[in-house]
Amino acid sequence: MVTEVESLIYKIKERTGIDISLYGEKAFFTTKENYLPILKQFDFEDFLVDEELNKLYFKVEYKGVKFVAEIDGGEKEKVVAELILSVFENSYVKPNEFSEEAFLKTALEGETTKIQLQKYIKRKNIPPYRCFCLVALLGNHKVSDVLEILENYSSKGKDISLVLGEDFIVQVKFLDETASSVYQSPTEYAESLLKSVENELGYPIDVAVGAEVSSFLEVSTSYKQALSAMRMQENLEIKGEVYSFKGMFLSKILEEMPKHKIEEYIRTLVDDNAKTIFTDSEMILTAEEFLKNDLNFSETSRKLYLHRNTLVYRLDKIQKATGLDIRKFSDAVTFRLITLLYKTIY
Amino acid sequence: MSSLLLKNIYKVYPSGVTAVTDFNLDIEDKEFIVFVGPSGCGKSTTLRMIAGLEEITDGELYIDGVLMNDVEPKDRDIAMVFQNYALYPHMSIYDNMAFGLKLRKMPKEEIDARVQEAARILGLEMYLQRKPKALSGGQKQRVALGRAIVREPKVFLLDEPLSNLDAKLRAQMRTELTKLHHKLATTFIYVTHDQIEAMTMGTRIVVMKDGFMQQVDTPQNLYDYPINLFVAGFIGTPQMNFFDAKLTGTPDEVYVEFGDGKVLLPKEKVELIYNLEDYLNTDKEVKFGIRPEDLSDDERFVGKDGNPVIDVKVDVLEMLGAETLLYCKLKGDETDDVVDSTATMIAKVDARSKSAMGQNVKLSVAVKHCHLFDKETEMTIMARNLAQKEEFLANKPVADAE
């Protein structure tokens, strides 16, 4: 195979005059004479431009083995790189067992190249709309029943539903005109679906959604976000009807912070006085309900059955102890961050 | 027939959080039961346990005498309606209503008959061929109800179904739901945090707090005989005024002393106090409760209707059209803390009231409607009637009675 790849880049050089170098996991091939590898950074998305050295790097695949390709040039040479990518793509016959489902799975996981995705979009007539991913964990419930309900929520021939494993369904929802006019957000769509399943089938399922992306080309981003939201709700025991990546974004950032750093922040932000608030379940419930109701006094006091004045009194107490007036948006954000820091640590 | 029995029901989550504690309720056929309480009180969790959407950690649930704990949700013959209409956007209203029946493989003719009948009941006949987006919020909620009706379930479970609607539509839908309940003559269990919905629709109301059932009773009884401070504060808008108080005087002439106020308790009220000797001229404090509507500033009656009078200063005045709310401070209360609710009392007076902000006024206290609670236990210390008091004293443990 080594010789096949080498002969491929020599063939390209022969016909186009373009020098190509390939960085593999354990090998390096180049059409240049006496040329040694110079690339250090392998972690990048589709392209990497090194303006200083006038090099353009991009990812290619040959018979399932991944390489980083290097050519001379910068931004302008990306077209050339696309052509080389296409040559690599078409240089061998792919095995037939790569079914559509398997392809979609690799696409969701971000394991396909942009060109492979573009080809799929063209072949399957995938609509050019914005889209997002929804993942559903069904527990012991019947996949076919939930799929039937999912189909009812789909725009015919547009949305893609995929069964991945015994109890795991993914849907790529395209936001055509109908969907955009009916649902304000992926979360609202997912809530409707969840309620329909509970209503029609009589059992609960876990549903998570990723954020909207501009087209099917970026579907893996939304899919990974949906998976991440599902995982986070399990770890953080966040209660909610639908788990959305956007809703858990703050938790995600905090989760990735080193524990000692979080403890340091808590020490700085929460003195003994403030601690009385953050360890008082009644105060925390009041504050969280106030934030949940968009800092709305009437709605919060109604939901908590508090006299409006009692609510004001408690918010004053919170302000006195923490220095944060959560009636103000900026202080409310800080308060939310501290409560999440607490949840992450304790 | 569709009666429900919830016996010692508990819900404990794996994290150890207890959402519902020892819930006991006997629901009769055709009742309209409302679960009401603040966020996180366990009302929706209880409803979801009845539906089978949440597992019951401990206790027993019976429907028509049959134990339901291990019965699949779809086999419980229950239909749910949520706040989220959850309509299929690409289906017509007819198909939306029929879908659940199709899933259950019901014959076409039967489906058609049921959908047409539900549409007739809900006034949706004209909209059957429309798509959901062509309907208003209220109409969409009616379709969601229709989807439940076509199943002809034994029990309807409704989880805050009107929360998505604006105030006007909500009021309209409240009456429609009550009519629907009468038409269908089926058991309804309704969850809400809105006490007006609870009071206007429920034949009985279950008030919940922190996972515990506080009181189960008819709306009128909840208003007249709240069992504890929480229920007293929850029922009624604006909520009942509470004052820390002491009972003084003699068994024949009992006074309630609070702040600078002192009112004579009518004899018929004194007779209802369970253990007067525990409170009369002792250190044991009580909470004196009086509803805003039981205070009056009408000069024609103040001091002349036989009710005691208290002196207050009007702090804030809210004119609501049909009535006026006076936010007052008791005489002698010089605090200037507008946010401290304990310093404020509210009187709901006639819209033609002549009281003004900053003015000292006299309020007549309709003390025959007052409430007394033990300050420590927060439970009422007054029976509804003499028979209940006698029964209570007869059943009192001997050691306690001594």
Image (tube, coloured by chain):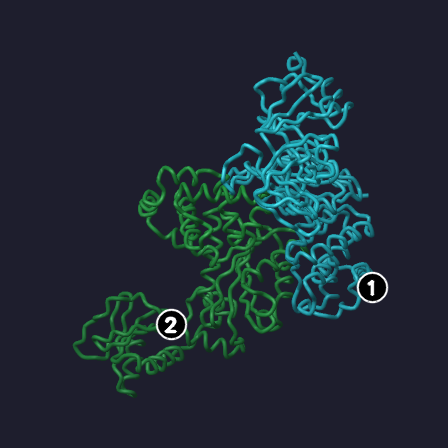
Chain colours: A green, B cyan
3D distance between C-alphas at marks 1 and 2 = 58 Å
How many other residues sit within 10 Å of disc 1, few (<14), some (14-19) or many (≥20)? few
Q: Nearer the viewer, residue B226 or B54?
A: B226
Quadrant of image for the N terminus of chain B:
top right
| Chain of the residue under the numbered disc 1 shown in the image | B
In the rendered image, the vertical position of residue A245 relative to residue A87, given as above or below: above
Which residue sits furthest left? A34
> Which residue appears at 73% of the width and 55% of the height?
B148
How many other residues sit within 10 Å of disc 2, few (<14), some (14-19) or many (≥20)? some
In the image, A36: left or right of A170? left
Disc number for residue A63: 2
Q: Nearer the viewer, mark 1 or mark 2?
A: 1
Residue type highlighted by circle 1: Glu
Residue A335 at x, y percent in the picture: 42, 48
Q: Nearer the viewer, residue A299 or B68?
A: A299
Describe the element under mark 1 as helix, strand or loop: helix
Disc number for residue B109: 1
Residue A152 at x, y percent in the picture: 65, 65
Q: Nearer the viewer, residue A277 or A110?
A: A277
Residue at mark 1 shares a chain with residue at mark 2: no
In the image, B214: left or right of B304? left
Residue type highlighted by circle 2: Lys
Q: Quadrant of residue B56?
A: top right
Disc number for residue A113: none
| Chain of the residue under the numbered disc 2 shown in the image | A
In the image, A22: left or right of A116? left
Describe the element under mark 2 as helix, strand or loop: loop
- The answer to the question of whether label 1 and label 2 lie on touching residues, with beta carbons closer than 8 A, is no
Residue A198 at x, y percent in the picture: 64, 53
In the rendered image, the vertical position of residue A297 relative to residue B137, given as above or below: above
